[in-house]
Amino acid sequence: MFAKRLKQLRKQRKLTMQEVADYVGVAKSTYAGYESGYRQPTLESIHTISRKLRTSADYLLGLTDYPEPTAELNHNAKEYLNYEQLHWDGVPLEKDDLDLIRILLERVIRDRNLPKDE
């Protein structure tokens, strides 16, 4: 299950094996072994891989069926809006939608920092 989920998430996140291997600090062949099930990563490597794939180690290990991490929420809206699978009540948000939201939020922040007339 680990190898299958690892490969599936990497592809969903549009990452190459080399990108994930570099992030983890292992050779591409080592990482390929993780995806094929030939090799088993250390616990530290699993944790690092889960951060890169924006999931939980529990999901990778088959302890939950929910790929979205819940323990470590990212509260930076700017980073959150870069996530490809955002939706509003089940309706997927397209790149253009997210661009508009970013523009709106930038305007809110800019206006908040303007001097107030008294």
Image: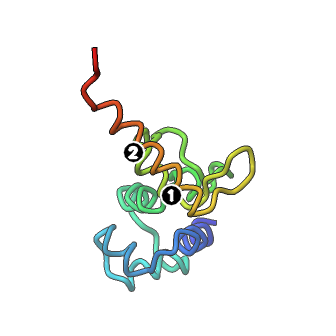
At x 28% / y 14%, what residue is drawn? 118
Q: Quadrant of the N terminus?
A: bottom right
**Image coords of residue 47 (percent x, y):** 41, 55
On screen, residue 106 versus residue 64, left or right, reads: left
Q: Amino acid at mark 2?
A: Glu
**Image coords of residue 67 (percent x, y):** 61, 54
**Image coords of residue 29 (percent x, y):** 39, 85
Q: Nearer the viewer, residue 56 or 99?
A: 99
Q: Quadrant of residue 24?
A: bottom left
Q: Secondary structure at mark 2?
A: helix
Instruction: Give the number of the disc on residue 99.
Output: 1
At x 55% / y 76%, what residue is drawn? 37
What residue would you read off at disc 2?
106
Q: Nearer the viewer, residue 25 or 103?
A: 103
Q: Secondary structure at mark 1?
A: helix
In the displayed structure, 13 sits above or below 72; it is: below
Q: Residues within 10 Å of mark 2 (few under 14, many from 20)?
A: few
Q: Nearer the viewer, residue 75 or 4?
A: 75
At x 32% / y 68%, what residue is drawn? 23
Q: CA distance from mark 2 to mark 1?
A: 11 Å
On screen, residue 104 versus residue 7, left or right, reads: left
In the displayed structure, 117 sits above or below 60; it is: above
At x 75% / y 49%, what residue is drawn? 90
On screen, residue 43 versus residue 96, left or right, reads: left
Residue furthest top in the image? 118
**Image coords of residue 45 (percent x, y):** 37, 62
